[in-house]
């Protein structure tokens, strides 16, 4: 029994047309690259406010609050870390920070139509305040600008020399 070539061709066209919107959507929502995440993580680390107190209540090189750490570690590691575990294990701290940074950068890339610097600004503002907007003056504006500067420095380095 021979198959009708026109019917096969039409079926292929119909299936292709049905998939086109899905392909277009996938292309528009490109995931954030590992390089972008690494640059942002390093920028957040470098820009972290340095408290002069040894027991400031913030943990790791990223200066994370214990109550924030609880939710982040649960989300990223599926278990809750203590501040001491987070503080004493830089690899785990970087893993958690990278996980959250990827989530927030991805949200911002979607919100800014893939504008990289606007996304970095929004994610840096969120990191400091919990909001993507409102960091346009004072200490938070200075912090966001610092993150953007460090991010750009990281992105401009050759891959072999990145932290």
Image (tube, rainbow, N blue to C red):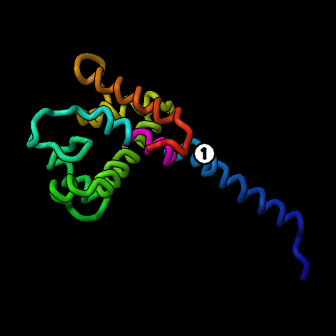
Magenta includes 7? Answer: no
Horizontal and vertical percent position of residue 83: 16, 54
Query: Looking at the image, which residue sits at the far top?
Result: 137
Of 128 and 151, nearer the camera is: 151
Horizontal and vertical percent position of residue 135: 28, 23
Query: Left or right: where does residue 37 sit relative to residue 58?
Result: right
**Residue 16: which quarter of the image?**
bottom right
- Viewport quadrant of the C terminus: top left
Query: Looking at the image, which residue sits at the far bottom?
Result: 1
Which contiguous range is marked in magenta?
33-41
Asked if residue 99 is positioned above or below residue 3 in the image, the reply reads above
- Residue located beneath label 1 in the image: 27
Horizontal and vertical percent position of residue 40: 40, 39
- Viewport quadrant of the N terminus: bottom right
Q: Please give the count of numbered marks on the rendered protein.
A: 1
Residue lying at 62% horizontally and 45% vertically, measured from the top left: 24
Query: Left or right: where does residue 116 sit relative to residue 23?
Result: left
Query: Left or right: where does residue 42 sit relative to residue 117?
Result: left
Residue lying at 41% horizontally and 37% vertically, measured from the top left: 108
Residue lying at 41% horizontally and 26% vertically, measured from the top left: 149
Q: Secondary structure at mark 1?
A: helix
Residue lying at 30% horizontally and 32% vertically, measured from the top left: 47
How many neighbours does mark 1 have within 10 angstroms: few (below 14), some (14-19), or many (20 or more)? few
Asked if residue 54 is positioned above or below residue 75 in the image, the reply reads above
Horizontal and vertical percent position of residue 127: 28, 37
| Magenta stretch: dominant secondary structure | helix
Magenta includes 38? Answer: yes
Of 123 and 43, nearer the camera is: 43
Asked if residue 7 is positioned above or below residue 61 in the image, the reply reads below
């Amino acid at each position: 029994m021979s198959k009708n070539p026109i019917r096969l061709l039409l079926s292929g066209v119909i299936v292709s047309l049905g998939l086109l919107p899905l392909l277009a959507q996938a292309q528009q929502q490109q995931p954030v690259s590992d390089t972008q995440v690494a640059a942002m993580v390093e920028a957040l680390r470098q820009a972290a406010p340095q408290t002069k107190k040894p027991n400031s209540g913030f943990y790791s090189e990223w200066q994370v609050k214990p109550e924030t750490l609880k939710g982040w570690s649960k989300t990223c590691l599926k278990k809750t870390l203590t501040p001491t575990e987070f503080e004493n294990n830089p690899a785990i701290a970087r893993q958690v920070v990278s996980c959250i940074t990827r989530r927030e950068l991805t949200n911002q890339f979607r919100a800014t139509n893939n504008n990289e610097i606007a996304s970095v600004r929004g994610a840096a503002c969120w990191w400091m305040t919990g909001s993507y907007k409102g960091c346009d003056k004072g200490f938070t504006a200075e912090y966001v600008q610092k993150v953007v500067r460090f991010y750009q420095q990281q992105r401009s380095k050759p891959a072999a020399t990145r932290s």
